Image (cartoon, helix red, strand yellow):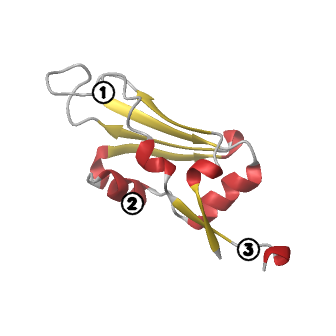
Amino acid sequence: MKTVKLVDLAKTIRSKNAGTDKITFDIIFREKDNYEMVKASKAITIETMAKLYGIPIERICDFVEYDPANAIKFTIYRSRPSGSPGEGDIFGCQQYPPLLDIEISIPEKEEEK
């Protein structure tokens, strides 16, 4: 087995505002093979995302592996409403960087061994 960073497998990794109290995350793959490989690795689950973001699982209100779009999506409750005093990312678009460096274990191909 070898590891590859998620950023090298996904076409799009983003976060964005999902209303006053939520931020949603999208991890979208161009190739179905990469999507299936990441799903099979179990590196991106509700538990691993809670740990990555240092939040209780209860703050993740949605987690979906959406096969028709080769996408993994999850939504978290904000700790403060969007735009409230002390809330530093009104659009939720600066929350995705921790996802970039997730290590995905992938099987080596025969010719690479």
Residue sitting at x 21%, y 37%: 79
Residue sitting at x 70%, y 41%: 68
Left or right, 88 with reference to 107: left
41 is higher (above) or lower (below) than 90? below
Residue sitting at x 14%, y 22%: 85
Name which of mark 2 and mark 1 comes first in the sequence.
2
Name which of mark 3 and mark 2 comes first in the sequence.
2
89 is higher (above) or lower (below) than 59? above
Q: Nearer the viewer, mark 2 or mark 1?
A: 1
41 is higher (above) or lower (below) than 54? below
> Which residue in the structure is indicated by mark 2?
47
Left or right, 11 with reference to 55: right
Left or right, 76 with reference to 112: left
Inspect the image, locate mark 3, and give the three-letter code of the amino acid beneath it: Glu
Inspect the image, locate mark 1, and give the three-letter code of the amino acid beneath it: Asp
Check disc 3: other Cα within 10 Å, few if <14, some if 14-19, many if 20+: few
Question: Label 2, label 1: how many angstroms apart (C-alpha)?
Answer: 24 Å
Q: Secondary structure at mark 3?
A: loop
Q: Quadrant of the C terminus?
A: bottom right
- Callout 3 touching callout 1 (CB < 8 Å): no
Inspect the image, locate mark 2, and give the three-letter code of the amino acid beneath it: Glu
The mark found on residue 108 in the picture is 3
13 is higher (above) or lower (below) than 100? above
Residue sitting at x 37%, y 33%: 23
> Which residue in the structure is indicated by mark 1?
89
Q: Secondary structure at mark 1?
A: loop
Check disc 1: other Cα within 10 Å, few if <14, some if 14-19, many if 20+: some
Q: Secondary structure at mark 2?
A: helix
> Please, which residue is most extreme toward the bottom here?
113
